[in-house]
Image (cartoon, rainbow, N blue to C red):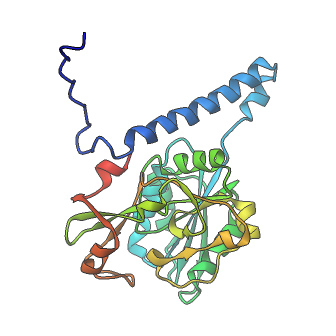
Amino acid sequence: MFGHQAPARPRTVSRGRRADDGTAAHLARRRAWIDDARRLKAKAIVAGCPPEAVGLIRRPTISVLVSTARPDRLEHVYRTVARQQDVQVQLVLLTRGFCPGDADLRRLAGEHGIDDVVYLYLPADVPLGECYNYSIRAADGDVVAIMDDGDHYGPNYLSDQLYSLEHSGADLVCKQAYCMYLEELSTTLLRFDEHERCFTDIVNVPTVLGARDVLIANPLPSFGMNEDGATWTPGAKGLRVYSTDKFNYFQTRLPAGGKAQLPDSGLLSCGKFQFFGSPEPRIDI
């Protein structure tokens, strides 16, 4: 039986993905999270809870906070929020320095099927951190999630982050490890991969998600307008922060800029080269 070995079967890798990129592990965790939620409802049924009580076992609602000074990003914001799956979402949209027309807001909400929208306005010179704190106070969701008006969030982003919050025991979750797409070079980098799936003291603000009550009690600092560089250290206040994996989110560095960013040549030294082309086909799972 030891003399001959059958040839190894080739490993099957989905198109556009590497076999060891963490996709299978992420999908396995998602299946486990979903199974846990189903078991919770099953236990309630076995325990004799009335149907109306079982129906109350629901996922927390999420208020998505977006602060933007760019009218041309509104379509992207509504499209991103509308495609989030398996979550009940409220959009809290704060515009800085411009006021979209009521007709435009109604059109965007209607076209993308978003029923629950809170619209806010502040002057352009209000610090971004204060904009988020103002939005948190106006939100109605059990949980709040900050989104950047220019970043990419996949359809399973909010659902997976919410599961991570519930199962990690953290007060806040974020993505400190993430991909960045350099559009001018058609190159994808992975940044801060050493901070993937671990507890941390620093929050990447455009990916923060946590209970509204926690963020009311621990407001964000008054950082400025450079959203890509916005970080926060709630660990100094004793909060437990968990950095999830790199999937379902990435930043894009556009050739023209629009934010205070390093040139592409500088960014190349701030991350690990992954591949040429957009990360979307590999990151959204």
Image-quadrant location for residue 51: top right
Does residue 277 appear anywhere in the picture?
no
Percent from the top left, x then y, of residue 116? 61, 55
Farthest residue to the front: give it. 3
- The image position of residue 266, as x and y in percent, is 29, 80
Q: Does residue 28 appear left or right of residue 283 in this picture?
A: right
Residue 3 showing in the rendered view: yes
Residue that protrudes farthest toward the top in the picture: 1
Q: Is residue 165 left or right of residue 218?
A: left
Which residue occupies 54% across, 69% down?
205
Give the image location of residue 251, x and y in percent: 38, 66
> Between residues 269 and 230, which one lies in front from this camera angle?
269
The part of the image, by quadrant, that contains residue 10 is top left
Residue at x-position 46% and y-position 77%: 229
Q: Residue at x 74, y 68 (%)?
A: 216
Left or right of 26 in this view: 51: right
Q: Quadrant of the N terminus?
A: top left
